[in-house]
Image (cartoon, helix red, strand yellow):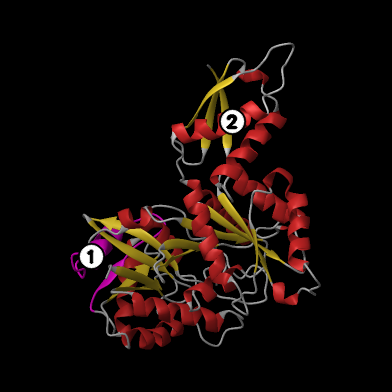
Amino acid sequence: MANIVAIVGRPNVGKSTLFNRLIERKQAIMDNESGVTRDRHYGYCEWNGKTFTVIDTGGYVEGSDDVFEGAIRTQVKEALQEANVILFMVDCHVGLHGLDQDFANVVRETGKPVVIVANKADNAEKSYMASEFYQLGISDKIFTISSTSGTGTGDLLDETVAYFEEEEDERDELSKLPRIAIVGRPNVGKSSFLNALLGKERSIVTNISGTTRDAIDSRYNLFGKDFILTDTAGIRRKTKVKEDIEFYSVLRAIQALQDSDICIVILDATNGLEAQDMNIIGLAHKYKKGTIIMVNKWDLWEKETNSAEEYRKHIAERLGPLSYIPVIFTSVINKQRIFKVVELALKVAENKTKKISTSKLNDVMLKEIENYPPPAVRGKHIKIKYITQLPTKTPTFAFFCNHPKDIKESYERYLINKLRSHFDFEGVPVKLVFRQK
């Protein structure tokens, strides 16, 4: 089992700031507002040759007005169960707080190694005040740090890794797995889909728009399948984004899309394919991602004969040149066809890395070109003599001809359609380049 460190504590003590410092990237959203982090958030840290997983958590609190309070507590307890070492974070500026004392009872029950991290120790006076946290009675060591500047984090990490057993770095293994991002507008069922696949509440789900804020990674390794799933915040139009937190949530969602291999774009069947859905699909195409469209809440759609086919045709008309993207109809709440979505996503992942031999390409495509040659331009006859696939991350094919600049866009679409029909590049953008013979 990998070494796992959970950063826990009451709200607004600087957990996400420390998390970002340890993983050396701004992955978790930080804000002075209480309750910004809600779900468990994972990242990797390396210190003195030892690698480990870090979990950022929401602030543990009881009796507040936050509607997410109970769900956040569940997420924190999950992190405590997973962790080998617990970093209990407190605030030197505020001092010992009643919430710290209440949460200490929860942490004590785990029986795991606990390190008290007294954050915001920006000067010597604040550092001296940290001694009051010994009253918590859960650790005989207190490390004063400033997660903003990084002061004291080296000593903290030395203490943390001392608890570890020797483990192999699993990052190389994970880097080879397909990454599938779940994207879409708010409230279409992204987090519900993730939880249904994993069989547990990995992401907090409510009817409130904007519940998910960070991009949440989860490894799925059931039924002989192994890949990384990323749940993301709902992506709304810029004009509708009013708060800083939502702005950064959308940025994280777009970053997750860029980092992925495959995008599952979820639509709400009752709303259809809206303009913002088209924008998200366009982003996936722009960044050369394999894509599938998952029409969720299909159980709420009033069905007639051939309802699915009619709906699919309507989407294809809206997509136009992006109609290579497959469409699947699901109901997450009824677990209808959700595992078929996974199978289709992995098939698209295979299509994205598919390599066609040069001999097979030429045998098939030169016959198609002979049957329908490119139209002459200004009296010049265009002859395509040779085709090969280029060594790129997405399917890219080079067509060698005598007048590469005179190939019309309509003929390029013809060639792409023939490549798709012969070699099955469903869900994957295909690029052609024309070069001088």
Q: Quadrant of residue 108?
A: bottom left
* Closest to the observer, 182 or 332: 332
Tell which residue pokes out farthest to the top in this image: 379
Q: What amino acid is found at the position of numbered circle 2 in the picture?
A: Lys
Between disc 1 and disc 2, the foreground one is: 2
Q: Position of residue 91 (x, y in %)?
A: 41, 71
Residue behind mark 1: 161
Please provide the residue range marked out in magenta: 140-166
Graded by Cα atoms within 10 Å as few (under 14), some (14 to 19) or many (20 or more), the crowding at tag 2 reads: few
Vertical position of residue 63 compared to residue 369: above or below: below
* Residue 418, numbered circle: none
Question: Is 31 on the left or on the right of 271, as rendered?
Answer: left
Question: Is 408 on the left or on the right of 108, as rendered?
Answer: right
Task: Decide if residue 14 is in sight here.
Answer: no
**Which corner quadrant holds the N terminus?**
bottom left
Graded by Cα atoms within 10 Å as few (under 14), some (14 to 19) or many (20 or more), the crowding at tag 1 reads: many
Q: Which numbered disc flags the more N-terminal residue, 1 or 2?
A: 1
* Closest to the observer, 189 or 7: 189
Q: Is residue 160 magenta?
A: yes
SS type, badge 2: helix
Q: Residue at x 29, y 63 (%)?
A: 52
Residue behind mark 2: 367
Task: Decide if residue 270 is in sight here.
Answer: yes
Q: Is residue 370 magenta?
A: no
Vertical position of residue 18 compared to residue 103: above or below: above
Q: What amino acid is found at the position of numbered circle 1 in the picture?
A: Val
